[in-house]
Structures are given as C-alpha cells and as structure tokens.
Amino acid sequence: MEIAERTQALALKIRKHKAGIETEEATKNAFVMPFISTVLGYDVFNPAEVIPEFTADVGTKKGEKIDYAVSHGGQIQLLIEVKKVNDPLRIEHASQLFRYFAVTNARIAILTNGEVYQFYTDLDAPNRMDAKPFLVLDFAALDETLLPELAKLTRESFDLDSVISAAGELKYIGQLKRVLAAQFKQPEGDWVRFLTTRVYEGSFTQRVREQFVPLVVKAAGQFLNEQVNDRLKNALGGPDSYVSVSSGTPVAEPVPEERPVDANGDVVTTEEEIEGYRIVRAIVCSEVPVSRVVVRDTKTYCGVLLDDNNRKPIARLWLNRSRKYLGVFDETRSETRLPIDDVQDIYRYADLLRQTVHRYLTNGIGAEVVPAPAVEPVLAD
C-alpha cells in the first residue's frame, strides 16, 4: 500500500477505537505501534529497529526512559514520547525529548497522543530541540500535503537530509495554516478590522465589528469552498465535475458516467460490481450467512447491505468512474472512501468489513427494513 492508504487505514482505526482507550499503554498498543510499523514500516518486534523504553542517562538523571527509539542504518534516528489519546499535547510533555535529543544522534523527535503527531528537530540551535514542531500530523483531519515529507521518514525511503532541509519551510507554513484556520473559524478583532475596512467606508465601531464578524466567517467559508471546487473542476477536466464529501474523508470525483439500463430504465449491475459484491460477501460470510448479504444498486454506486436494510450498509462500491473507491462505515455509519485500483483490492480491507457486520449484530442497529427496488440484478453464483 502507498503511504496515503496506510495513513487512511490507521485514521479509520483511530476514529473507531479512541473512545475506548483510557491509558497511555493502551494508546501505545492500539495506535502508536501501528503507526511505527504500518505507516513508517519499521519492525516493532526487532530491537535493532525499534527500542521500547529506551534509556540514555542524561547528566545527573539516571534511568530515565523514552517510550520508543527508532533506528535506521545502525543509528538512532527517531525519538518518540507518547501521551494518552485525547490528552492535549503541550511542550511541557516533551521534557524527556529535550534531554534525550541532546545526547543521541537523533535529529527527529516526535510527541504524540496516538492521534496527533508533532515532529521536532533542531532548526533554532544545533543539537537542541526546537520549542515548536516543524510538522503536525493530525489523523482526525489528515493533511495529505504532508504525506510526502512523512514518507521520507519511512524505513524504505528514509531521507533525513531532505526532511531537515524542508523543515524550516514546513514549520512556518504549518503555523501560518493553523493561524488562518483559526481566523476562519473564530476571527480575531484585528482580522475582522483588516477585512472590514477594505469593504466598509464608515467608521469601524463596536456595532460594525459585531455586524461583520459573522459576515467574515461566512465569506471565508464560501471563498474556501469556491476555491476548492474551482481547483477540482480544473483537475477533473471541466465545469461538469463535482465534489462529493462524505462524513469521513473528502473525496473529489468526476461526474459519474452514464450507467447501463435495461428496457425498463432500471440500472444494470455491471460484471465488475457483481465481482466486488461477491468478494464482500465472501469476506463477511465468517460473520453471517451469505443469504443475509444483499446487493442494491443505485445510479451512482453499488451498495452491499446486511438484511437488505439501508440502515445496515456493509460497503459501497464506487466503481463506475476512472478512480475506484471502496466505501466503508464506522460505528456512526459515516462513510470513508478508500481508493482501490482493482476489485481484488477489497480483500485488503477484510477486517474493516467484518467489524462492520459484527457491530450490527452485537449492537442491534437498524430495526427498520427498507424494501429493495422492484427490479433486482440477477447474480449467478
């Protein structure tokens, strides 16, 4: 899998399970070790690559430990300090990282709560960890522009020099983006004044400020949406493109091609969709009888349901487009679309599909059964 797919899979796992994680040790096992192994590609069970409870005596402080040290090329390259998921990360939490950074060869220190990862280096003074991170990776809202830099820290593509050389720019760009994001959500007085005085000719009084605060927020949101749509339309080849945003990961897609229809005007399920349905059915047959797994086609996607109930979606097959996706669902039935190259790639997400069915069975979700369309596709086994 590419790093984008690996991070998306971990993001889905974090979203599903973080509510049940109550300790730092559970955070390590559930989220941080998968990050080190699945995303970065290091063998967490090989002490030559990943050293848990790493010790390096610092001055008068003896026996202090840092949660993980990651080695590459025979040298300690990454230091990782873990806090409990949902705990906010503060620089005060990084005291051990500061001390260890000065006495090891590591140039990258990571402070994380399993969901947010703050990456530090020594831009301000050699061999002294900076007080501010140069990169912040938040699995609750993945910024895919950061993934190429993250890839440079993976086992297969490790390139420390490139990371360090880009760190200065990343540090300030990241901080500027966070400042802008904060201003768009809750603009400060100076920001409101700056924009208002560009369009309003009267005095900037308290009444005017209160009038323009919601207008600034609304205008900023509309501006961002318009910019995103314009970029996507250009990238997808014309004004007839649209953006589909699920409750999970935003996905840009072209307008679906015309679906084949039969003489009655009903949508015909394609051979590729039938194959995808059979794969999903084969995966979840360990949880339920195959007779309970039903396909229901629509004009834009092919749905796979439990008990023919649209409140129990198992998967959505977005195959009628140049870029294919498998739609999976979390405990709130919010959809996340995972890119696939071929229907056989569905097998990579077998555990997620089984978990979805298991959740319906144990939680009793969806008592209401919605009848299927009058015309069902005929699926030959």
Image (cartoon, rainbow, N blue to C red):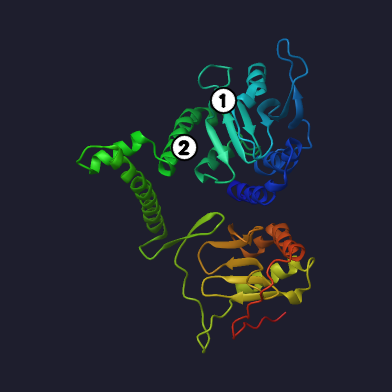
Q: Is 80 above or below relative to 10?
A: above
Depth check: give the residue in front, 45 or 295. 295
Question: Which numbered disc, 1 or 2, marks the residue that appears first in the sequence?
Answer: 1
Q: Nearer the viewer, mark 1 or mark 2?
A: 2
Report whether 251 appears left or right of 109. Answer: left
> Mark 1 highlights which residue?
121
**Residue 187 can be seen in this image:** yes
**Residue 106 can be seen in this image:** no
Image mark for residue 178: 2
Secondary structure under the numbered disc 2 in the rendered image = helix
Q: Is 138 above or below relative to 350?
A: above
Say which residue appears at 63% left-offset and 31% top-offset. Answer: 111
Q: Amino acid at mark 2?
A: Arg
Residue farthest to the front, as pictured: 207
Residue farthest to the left, as pictured: 201
Q: Are marks 1 and 2 in contact (CB under 8 Å)?
A: no
Q: Residue 307 lies in what quarter of the image?
A: bottom right
Q: Residue 348 lies in what quarter of the image?
A: bottom right
Q: Residue 199 lies in what quarter of the image?
A: top left
Tell me the CA gap for discs 1 and 2: 19 Å
